[in-house]
Amino acid sequence: MAWDSIRSGVKRWALAAVAACLAESATFPIDFCKTRLQLQNEMGRSLTGEVAAQRLGMVGTFRHIAATEGLRAMYGGLPAAALRQAVYGGIGVGLYAPVRDLVVG
């Protein structure tokens, strides 16, 4: 009986971790562009050092990065972000109910 409970918990954690990684993969370019916009706004300059002539919105920033650095640049930090999501998302979603039942029940 205990083996089935452990197996079920591991399965729930693995499924939650995979779901969290897929969600992170889908939203990572948006987060990347958001961070670039925040840096541009914070520094008042573009990342290359020149004074930003115009403020680009989200779509303009996405296009600028795709044109100058390529789409692949937007996924540069994805492995680290996916690992973080696998740990936090897997624990938070997948193991919450079994641990709650263990503590409360």
Image (cartoon, rainbow, N blue to C red):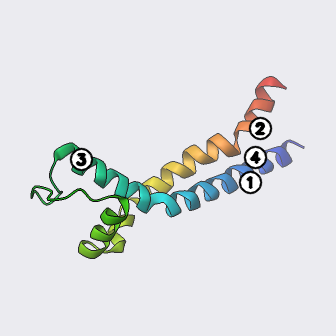
Question: The N terminus is located in which quarter?
Answer: top right
The residue labelled by disc 3 is 41
Where 15 sits versus 101, above or below?
Answer: below
Mark 4 vs mark 3, CA separation in Å: 44 Å
Sequence-first tag of 1 and 3 = 1
Q: Nearer the viewer, residue 65 or 99?
A: 65
Mark 1 vs mark 2, CA separation in Å: 12 Å
Sequence-first tag of 4 and 2 = 4
Q: Given contact means CB atoms under 8 Å apart, are the residues at marks 4 and 2 in contact? A: yes
The residue labelled by disc 1 is 11
The residue labelled by disc 2 is 98
Q: Given contact means CB atoms under 8 Å apart, are the residues at marks 1 and 2 in contact? A: no
Q: Nearer the viewer, residue 56 or 85?
A: 56
Q: Given contact means CB atoms under 8 Å apart, are the residues at marks 1 and 3 in contact? A: no
Q: Nearer the viewer, mark 1 or mark 3?
A: 3
Q: Residues within 10 Å of mark 2 (few under 14, many from 20)?
A: some
Q: Position of residue 23 (x, y in %)?
A: 57, 58
Q: Position of residue 79 (x, y in %)?
A: 44, 60
Q: At label 2, which amino acid type do we have? A: Pro
Residue extending furthest front?
54
Q: Quadrant of residue 103?
A: top right
The residue labelled by disc 4 is 9
Disc 4 element: helix
Mark 1 vs mark 3, CA separation in Å: 43 Å
Sequence-first tag of 1 and 2 = 1
